[in-house]
Image: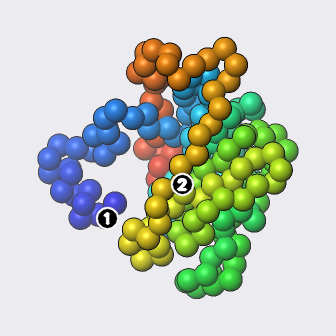
Amino acid sequence: MTERQLAGLSMLGVSKPYEMLTNCTYLVDGEVDVYGLKIYGAPWHPMPGYSFYRSRGQAILHKWNNIPPKVDVLVTHTPPLGHGDYNAWNKCDGVLAGCAELLNTVEFRVKPKYHVFGHIHDMHGATSNGYTTFVNAAICDHKLRVDHGPIIFDIPVPYGHSKTESEQSISDATSSVPSEEDSDSGST
């Protein structure tokens, strides 16, 4: 969101745009259980100059260490190194822009069935390491034009649960929202 857009929202009395979201759960270092599936969301990335930035190494690893084990679906903004992260359009042309610390967290500790992310817009698609399916679900190209359709996949519901369960488990889910210091673009 641009400074101008934020200023416009501020004039309308909106200081936290995520509070305008309805019928969804906004996850920032948070987890929701939907029909027995554990879904965890984290917005962090190692790209300076944007909100939710953390430098590579210990600073971003500290954030990835918050991801609990036994998550079924991990949702992050940035890709792990080597999966949907080939940057082919800007000053980083030809660079794998994924996060090595995230890759190690996913492959050696968390081991989700699915890891969904975006960030590298032109690498829309899916890969696998044999256990985790990595999905770059970015729908825009590098100029932010809608260029890709959604990636739709069906996740089997865990034993003992059903997609016909009450919607109560979803509506009871609590949203996790960022603190001002966590979303500061200058944080490291």
Q: Give the spatial CA distance, label 1 vs label 2.
A: 28 Å
Q: Residue furthest left?
A: 12
Characterize the local packing of mark 2: few (<14), some (14-19) or many (20 or more) Cα atoms within 10 angstroms.
some
Characterize the local packing of mark 1: few (<14), some (14-19) or many (20 or more) Cα atoms within 10 angstroms.
few
Viewer-proximal residue among 93 and 122? 122
Q: Quadrant of the N terminus?
A: bottom left
> Disc 2 marks which residue?
151
Per the image, label 1 sits on a secondary structure element best described as: loop
> Disc 1 marks which residue?
2
Q: Residue at x 59, y 40 (%)?
A: 154
Q: Is residue 101 above or below residue 62?
A: below
Please provide percent x and percent y for residue 62.
70, 45
Total numbered labels: 2
Asked if disc 1 and disc 2 are in contact, CB closer than 8 Å, the reply is no
Please provide percent x and percent y for residue 182.
51, 45
Q: Is residue 154 above or below residue 121?
A: above
Q: Amino acid at mark 2?
A: Ile
Q: Residue at x 75, y 32 (%)?
A: 69
Mark closer to the observer (1, 2): 2
Is residue 169 in view?
no
Q: Is residue 15 above or below residue 99?
A: above
